[in-house]
Image (tube, grey):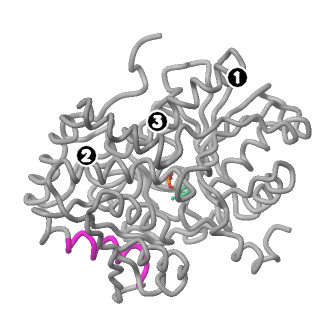
Amino acid sequence: MIANKFNILPSEEGFYGNYGGQFVDETLKEEFNRIYREFLHWKDNSDFNAELNYLLKNYAGRPSPVYFAGNLSEKYGCKIYLKREDLNHTGAHKINHSLGEALLAKKMGKTKLIAETGAGQHGVAIATAAAIMGLDCDIYMGEVDIEKEKPNVDRMRILGANIISVTNGTKTLKEAVDAAFSAYINEYKTAMYAIGSAVGPHPFPMIIEHFQSVIGREARAQFIEQTGALPQCVIACIGGGSNAIGLFNGFLEDETVDIYGVEPLGRGKNPGDNAASMTYGKDGIIHGFRCKLLQDSQGNPANAYSVASGLDYPGVGPKHCYLNQIGRVKYDLIDDNEAISAFYELSKTEGIIPALESSHAIAYGLKLAKSGRYKNMLINVSGRGDKDIQFVLQNKQIGI
Ligand SMILES: *Cc1c(COP(=O)(O)O)cnc(C)c1O
């Protein structure tokens, strides 16, 4: 095994090949470079890691198990293993990087976290991390999303976060990101920007990737312990790409392991009907970094759609773009109906209700299992589906 043939770090300027970088103004550049230096210092600091590992274990519930899904395996003729990020505190993988970001902010002497949220999943994880670290927390959220995502808004408020309603434009995630960024420019001396996926300007993608890599490290060791060998393939869903890069990093150097990232095809391939940035996007810049980006005819970021609101981002993390370019990871598609079918299939066959985001990875795994190509596989269940139950029941016409 050649060390780091595929699992590369970004350049000093934050590029993975052509992707990533830091397309922001000078003030932010200076601050982001400071965060970069601090991150490089703290990530190898034994006190920092002892504190983080204590929280991951005793607060978040890690390690999350790898579970052999025996019923599914029998039904589909392939040994299917699930990495259970759905069992984490707050119900998804997002707590992994939220705790890391909050601890880093605290070590840097910051007193507040600033974040945006769409469906509220990232907001809840950040509000949770802020509560345990004793930090203030401002969450920017579109007025439309505040209305739609009431349970998560209530959760964030109970956790002590301030919800700031964003009322311009489409009043959703895109405007919330802009508002959070503007607020941050005024407050960066005391506040830390807490991004929600492996996206954004350097160094955020590498910070998120670092804190999520615990998934792949654990999963590789657990799989080997249970089966005596590596999996033949691993699968994760891709929104911005944080749960996926966390899993993939554990296996990138294992060239016998095929790796699949699953993008949401939504209602179909027409613009505005999906969030398949890698498949249908062109090189472009969004939120301070270069990636495969869904764009309208003028080259502006296009509207993205998926039944899973955690996946509907028009861009995708820079390391994924690089891994796609060099062919180490295969990126493929699952539509809304296939995801909802898999949501029911895992629920009824194994008694595990997955998030609609994770259902994309499961649907793809089941397709591969049926094809007979693999004897075993490992699928990341990035989160639990409690948040999606109302929606799925109200939209019975889709998929079933
Ligand atoms: C937010 C979310 C995702 C998508 O985010 P990534 O950064 O692509 O991992 C996937 N699954 C769940 C359960 C989520 O909450």
Q: Residues within 10 Å of mark 3 (few under 14, many from 20)?
A: many
The mark closer to the camera, 2 or 1, is 1
In the picture, the disc for residue 203 is: 2
What's the residue type where badge 3 is placed? Val
Q: Are marks 2 and 1 in contact (CB under 8 Å)?
A: no
What's the residue type where badge 1 is placed? Gln
Residue 182: say if magenta: yes
Query: In terms of image quadrants, where is residue 386?
Result: bottom right
State whether residue 104 is above or below residue 149.
Answer: above
**Residue at image location 31% in from the left, 31% down from the top:** 9
Residue 124 image position (x, y, % from top left)? 45, 66
Please give the range of residues in magenta: 171-183
Q: Which residue is mark 1?
A: 226
Mark 3, secondary structure of its residue: helix
- The total of numbered circles placed on residues is 3
Of label 3 and label 2, which has the lower sequence position?
A: 2
Mark 2, secondary structure of its residue: loop
* CA separation in Å, label 2 and label 1: 36 Å
Residue 191: say if magenta: no
In the picture, the disc for residue 214 is: 3
